[in-house]
Image: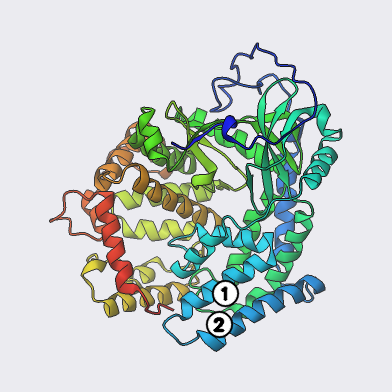
Amino acid sequence: MDHKTLDQQPSDRTVAGPIDVDDVRPTPDDLHLGSFSDDPPWSLATNELSWYRVVKILRRQQARQLPYLTRPPRIPPARRALTVLAVLGRALGLWYLRERGTPASRAGLARRMRLAAERLGPTYIKLAQIISAGEGVFPAELVEECKKCRDQVPAVDFDQVVEVVETELGRPMDEVFASFDRTPLAAASIAQVHAAVLHSGEEVVVKVQRPGIDALVRKDLRVLSWIAPFLVGRIPVAALANPPALVELFAETIVEELDFRLEAANMLDVAEVFVKLDQQGFVVPRPHPDHVTKRVLVMERLSGFNFNDVEGMKQAGVDTHAVIRTGMIGFLEGAFLHGVFHGDLHGGNLFVMEDGRTALMDFGITGRLSEEERTAFLRMMMTATTNDVRGQVAALRDLGALPHDTDIDAVIADLRLDGPPLDPTSMAPEELVKEIQQVIKALLGYGARMPKSLMLYIKNLIFIDGAIASLAPELDMFAAVTDVATHFATAHGTTIAAQLGMAQESWDLDLDGVKAGFGVDPSKTNSLSYAELRERRALIQKRLSGRDLG
């Protein structure tokens, strides 16, 4: 059983002073503000959060910086540019000489790009990590290679950690913490996290930014913006995520992670959304009222089961099917109804508590939708469940995946979306490849791209998909879709109908259309377990194996 508790972490604490434990815990008087734990180390209801007051200003500043960081410069940062060009040039050169034109061309290029990212350091490893969670968004070969970058970031020396903490908090570490673990719980590309204990006895997690990472990321974004236009049409793994668009997407994602005050604000905002939805299946750790700065974030420490520890959960009596249902509904409600959702769900960013609730961690990447985007997402869900093809394409256009002047009817005709559904498992490999090539060519012709909000949404759906494989492989997918649609119609039908300007009674789930979306014959298939769905995917992947889709 893999149960995350403080006692199981390395016992190499640096003891900095006596612990004055106050056994009297405050009453949870802040649960109306957010979906927090029932045993609070501190209350956010009675504290004025000085770091929160500057969040709106910080977001405006970042929005102004992004066009500069992603605009191709005439002259990039010279030294860094030469390093990047040398590493990438060597990778592309070796691919050109050894793998280009062979059956292993795409896989070989993906492997060399991953190795180059590791050599170039944290910024490029972070880019690879984002790509690694993009199954269905980025080419499969590239995704698989980039998954190997998830654990490739070495920890920062403890002396550097101390320097950052003391500089940011403005006083010696032993004045703030009674103990502070030297070995990090985890080390990532932007920061690493350490377990610690405050003098008042609260167990906390301290997130510390890597020294110099802010300046390095901004240099790398300028270099990437300069290089990206030269890669258009030259590398086969680009697919729809063309290099300039990918740089823009990366910049939007990573810049916000460089200021932990924004992350702490994200924690509060997501927690507040769950309260508004009366969604009690999630817990968000409380950020500390005082110890939050640009480069240091002190937060409440929670414990629970690793997300893949199915045996441990079941032994503790956790209903894993309920965990999946809560995850699906909570994520969708946050996006569709309030336009705020955790944007980086993966096994390392959440765990399941013994009471069955899911604790969410790491809010550096958070989806935030404008009112137009949120309405488009809502319309996308509605039209998907009612098999309204035109409405689905229009919703994707409104999300920014297609230009605003796109001819919707022409897209439907070119992609043959108005015809009978195709069963990819019944198609010959050559037919399947040809079909995918035609779709990609048509989308590129219309200027399709992957906006940040849609990428985060799809990434999360992919994670939930994988979570079903671990926690509920026997789940009937048609029943799950019906359950989610019924919940939305019952709990939010009036609100949704009013926002979309439609009659509530006109929303009727088209289960045959849902079945067709899974690529099965509606008249012959009454149920489809997730395990059966995985078998279909494996068959499709086998038929595509070794064939060039570019």
Which residue appears farthest toward the left when viewing the image? Answer: 524
How packed is label 1: few (under 14 Cα within 10 Å), some, or many (20 or more)?
many
Q: Is residue 30 left or right of residue 438?
A: right
- Quarter of the rendering occupied by the N terminus: top left
State the residue at coordinates (33%, 40%).
484
State the residue at coordinates (38%, 50%).
465
| Distance in Å between CA atoms under marks 2 and 1 | 7 Å
Q: Secondary structure at mark 1?
A: helix
- Quarter of the rendering occupied by the C terminus: bottom left
Q: Position of residue 140 (x, y in %)?
A: 44, 67
Q: Is residue 501 above or below residue 541?
A: above
Amino acid type assigned to the residue bearing label 1 in the image:
Arg
Which residue appears farthest toward the top when viewing the image? Answer: 24
State the residue at coordinates (36%, 30%).
315
Which corner quadrant of the image does residue 332 belong to?
top left
How packed is label 2: few (under 14 Cα within 10 Å), some, or many (20 or more)?
many
Residue 343's label in the rendered image is: none
The residue labelled by disc 1 is: 112
State the residue at coordinates (49%, 55%).
454
Amino acid type assigned to the residue bearing label 2 in the image:
Trp
Q: Is residue 458 above or below residue 118?
A: above
Q: Position of residue 286 (x, y in %)?
A: 63, 29
State if disc 1 and disc 2 touch (CB < 8 Å).
yes
Which corner quadrant of the image does residue 164 belong to?
top right
Residue 95's label in the rendered image is: 2
